[in-house]
Image: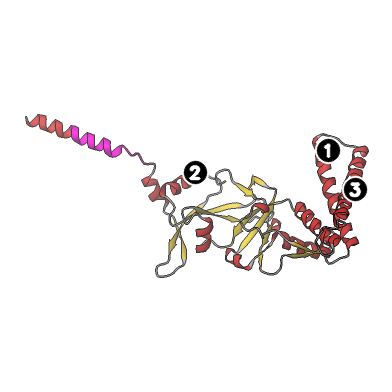
């Protein structure tokens, strides 16, 4: 990640908190209105999937577009018919079965719509909990980045606390109403439980998987327990980078539970490494030979 200047955009479904990026849709509309929302979401998703497939096969033209549109509508209507059928089951124990099932399906479709990846960042490097939870108990590193102007629109600050609910009425108008879209976006990707607030998290949004970093690597900070050989390896690997990187190490503040960031003395590392373990043995062998030579001269 460091030498290739890449970042990994994770699937939110893999986050360690199962409540993170898992909003609950609040069905504040009638069943008929919920059907309209679900129909639109399914039709739009299916159309996007088929269009992508058609492009990969180099299918184009009015007939292809018409076929995609027809199939997308057919797929949406088929799924809604299936929901209606399930709701009519006399063994269904849900209260207001149709309304409840439509709300659940909208929730599932909403999450499918947010198919982006996330890079989780923090706004401070001296948080003891962050080093313990995410820095391999201070054996690891912290990479510090600056945010270029052309990337700032993809970076969002996390809100802590509040509700996981997102209103169906907001989902219905989110494509036309920017304020509704912000409320939905926040509920899906940018809100976490208050107990996570120590992280002071920001999220960079992009295509899932390993991508070229849109951020600028500025510094690398080594944990208190970070091995000297790892420090040397990273310093050496980045020493010829066209944009220089600063190196720091975490130190304790005596008498407190606070951490401080101190500039790393790279010259000391370069004096220690690369190390050759047999050099001491060679030195002893040389001394032994000298002793034998002196003894022979004495005799």
Circle 3 residues within 10 Å: few <14, some 14–19, many ≥20: some
Where residue 288 appears, x then y in whole percent?
A: 19, 34
Q: CA distance from mark 1 to mark 2?
A: 44 Å
Residue 84: name its quadrant. bottom right
| Residue at the image position 77 percent from the left and 64 percent from the top | 166
- Which residues are the magenta region? 275-289
Identity of the residue furthest to the front in this view: 91
Q: Overall secondary structure of the magenta stretch? A: helix
3 or 1: mark nearer the eye: 3
| Mark 3 / mark 1, whichever is N-terminal | 1
Is 272 displayed left or right of 78 in the figure?
A: left
| Residue at the image position 51 percent from the left and 55 percent from the top | 135
> In the rendered view, would you say 271 is above or below 259?
above
Is 233 displayed left or right of 19 in the figure?
A: left
Q: Which residue is mark 1?
A: 54
3 or 2: mark nearer the eye: 3
Where residue 140 appears, x then y in whole percent?
A: 49, 52
| Residue at the image position 55 percent from the left and 45 percent from the top | 242
Q: Which residue is mark 2?
A: 237
Residue 16: name its quadrant. bottom right
> In the rendered view, would you say 290 is above or below 244?
above
Reply yes or no: does residue 246 show up in magenta: no
Q: Of 96 and 58, which appears nearest the observer?
A: 96
Q: CA distance from mark 3 to mark 2?
A: 54 Å
Dot 2: element? helix
| Mark 1 / mark 2, whichever is N-terminal | 1
Q: Of 292 and 168, which appears nearest the observer?
A: 168
Q: Which residue is mark 3?
A: 73
Dot 1: element? helix
Label annotation for residue 294? none
- Quadrant where the C terminus lies? top left
Dot 3: element? helix
């Amino acid at each position: 990640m460091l030498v290739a200047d890449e970042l990994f955009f994770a699937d939110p479904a893999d986050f360690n908190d199962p409540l993170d990026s898992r909003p609950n849709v609040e069905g504040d509309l009638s069943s008929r209105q919920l059907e309209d929302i679900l129909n639109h979401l399914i039709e739009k998703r299916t159309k996007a999937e088929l269009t992508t497939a058609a492009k990969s096969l180099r299918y184009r033209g009015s007939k292809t577009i018409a076929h995609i549109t027809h199939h997308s509508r057919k797929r949406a209507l088929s799924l809604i018919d299936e929901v209606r059928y399930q709701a009519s089951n006399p063994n269904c124990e849900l209260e207001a079965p149709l309304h409840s099932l439509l709300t659940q399906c909208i929730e599932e479709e909403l999450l499918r719509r947010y198919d982006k990846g996330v890079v989780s960042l923090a706004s401070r490097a001296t948080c003891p909990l962050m080093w313990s939870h995410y820095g391999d108990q201070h054996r690891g590193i912290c990479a510090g980045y600056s945010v270029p102007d052309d990337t700032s629109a993809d970076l969002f600050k996390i809100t802590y606390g509040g509700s996981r609910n997102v209103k169906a009425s907001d989902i219905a108008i989110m494509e036309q109403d920017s304020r509704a879209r912000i409320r939905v976006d926040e509920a899906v990707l940018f809100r976490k439980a208050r107990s996570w607030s120590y992280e002071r998290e920001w999220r960079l949004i992009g295509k899932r998987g390993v991508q070229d970093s849109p951020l600028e690597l500025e510094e690398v900070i080594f944990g208190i327990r970070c091995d000297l050989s790892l420090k040397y390896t990273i310093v050496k690997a980045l020493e010829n980078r066209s944009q220089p990187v600063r190196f720091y190490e975490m130190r304790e503040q005596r008498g407190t539970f606070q951490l401080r960031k101190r500039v790393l003395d790279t010259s000391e590392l370069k004096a220690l490494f690369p190390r050759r373990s047999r050099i001491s043995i060679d030195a002893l062998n040389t001394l032994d030979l000298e002793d034998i030579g002196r003894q022979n001269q004495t005799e």
